[in-house]
Image (tube, rainbow, N blue to C red):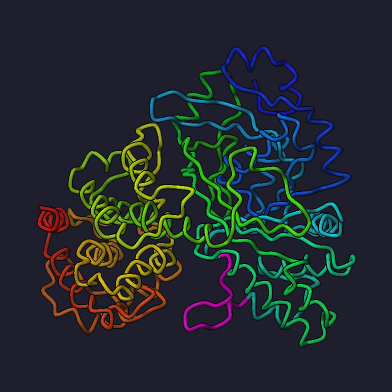
Amino acid sequence: MRLNSKELGNTSQWEKAGIELPQFDREAMLQATKSGPQWIHFGAGNIFRAFLTALQQELLDQGIEKTGIIVAAGYDGEIIDRIYRPHDNLTMAVTLKVNGTIQKRVLASVAEALRMDKAEDFERVKEVFRTKSLQMASLTITEKGYNLTGPGEQLLPDVAADFLSGPKAPKNYIGKLASLCYERYLAGKLPLALVSMDNCSHNGDRLFKAVEAFAVQWTEKGFTEKGFVDYIRDPAKISCPWTMIDKITPRPDEGVKNMLESAGLTDMAGELTSKNTLVTPYVNAEEAQYLVIEDKFPAGRPGLEKAGVFFTDRETVDKVEKMKVCTCLNPLHTALAIFGCLLGYTKISDEMKNPDLVKLIEGIGYTEGLPVVVNPGILSPKQFIDEVLQVRFPNPFMPDTPQRIATDTSQKIPIRFGETIKAYLASDTLDVHNLKLIPLVLAGWLRYLLGIDDADAVFTVSPDPLYESLSKMLSGLKLGHKGPFRQILEPILSDPRIFAVNLYEAGLGEQVERCFKELLAGPGAVSNTLKRYLA
């Protein structure tokens, strides 16, 4: 049994294997999408495959929508050639539930899969953008995908080149999106929603500012018509709604592959792309999921509320996003990632068996975080943390790793911890000096960057855009180093680009130094320090 369109016709073999099939007419969907596309998505990774395609499939199954999603890969186009096209754009979705049950289903709502780095495919994307029926272009390109500058606020090389060369053949991801918007402008100033679904604060604003920067540069240099900037800035034409998305989609698990093969599937093997992306025909994900979107869609939108998506106003999205990203999930995840790597764990669920780590994230969430959370109304912060700690993180069937979560930590810290520190500083009733565990996590991250675990063994630090520069600043430090650490740590701890504040000016710099010294004392110091702080 193979995952392709032809074999879907033999429904009995799928039913025998306990695999759910789509309930809509796929050929009709493909034709409807080709003639009148409504939704294109940028970013062909697992969050898209496991979550967004499932939402649209539910609408297709119910007969609420008639079109599917067109997906375009911009960072790693090999995903399209290696996984999407060989399997006719189908995905085997495996939902791992905390009670041990497993839901297996074929997701078939992707109508086309395109590579942004191939001229023929990019021309097709341009054609889609010139289509009046298009309602939204969503993105899951990771937080760093919206950055136009690097360390020192210097333009990234591809951005600088695109600013000078114009919209014909941009290299930068956002540059390509901006050029597509110009195609839509030339097609009659058609409206569209650009919807970032990445985990970053005020993601719609970050997306808008990045696209606007290209529009301004290109217009000033005469590459685009003068009205293009006004078009991008007109919310009745181009909207960039804020969103909050939450669903854990770990790296594909070998055990899941074996389970699918035992059910009769013979083509579940994965591959590594040249960019080191593990791609598989299946995705494994947790059951819990949330998507909250500001309801600003000038060209209309799919009826995703009928699939469980919350549509609301910007203020509520902001509150939900801050609740999750700054307090109720992401900081706890990052804390587990940092200390999990230092303590030799390879599964988040196994970390939840360590009482000290459980106390750590309970303290960060309930004690230090909840006092500065504003209840968004549509979700309860306390109940959200309860679900995270009691259901989501302990799920032994979720093969998520601290090593995966530790990726790009420098890009996450300003939001996941910096915003809480800023809230304490702004409070009339809360004292920032009462924060004990957040400074410990920040010190733990610096200790993690040394690439030496608590047993004094070397480990591989997860990819991070600041790792090279920070590791140089920390070079020479080893377990047992007595300090003083001020000269080494001050340039890092005083950098608001990393922590959202100057930690010394916030009154926490010296505390982080002390924690770092304790964590570096010798083998076993990380475990012992956690016990002291959580006693």
Q: Nearer the viewer, residue 458 or 494?
A: 494
Residue 441 in the image, given as x and y percentages of width and height: 26, 62
Q: How many marks?
A: 0
Please report the residue visible at 15 percent of the width from the left and 72 percent of the height from the top.
514
Q: Is residue 86 left or right of residue 168?
A: left
For the point 48% across and 57% down, which residue is it? Answer: 321
Q: Quadrant of residue 190?
A: bottom right
The reply, left or right, for residue 227 in relation to residue 276 is right
- Residue 86 seen from this side: no
Of residues 392 and 477, which is closer to you in this image?
392
Given residues 46 and 230, the one toward you in this image is: 230
Residue at figure coordinates x 11%, y 65% from the top left: 521
* Position in image of residue 268 (x %, y %): 57, 30
Image height of 169 relative to 460, above or below = below
248 or 58: which is nearer to us?
58
Q: Which residues are magenta?
A: 145-157
Residue placed at 59% from the left, 53% from the top? 312
User: Would you place residue 310 above or below residue 159 in this image?
Assistant: above
> Is residue 151 on the magenta stretch?
yes
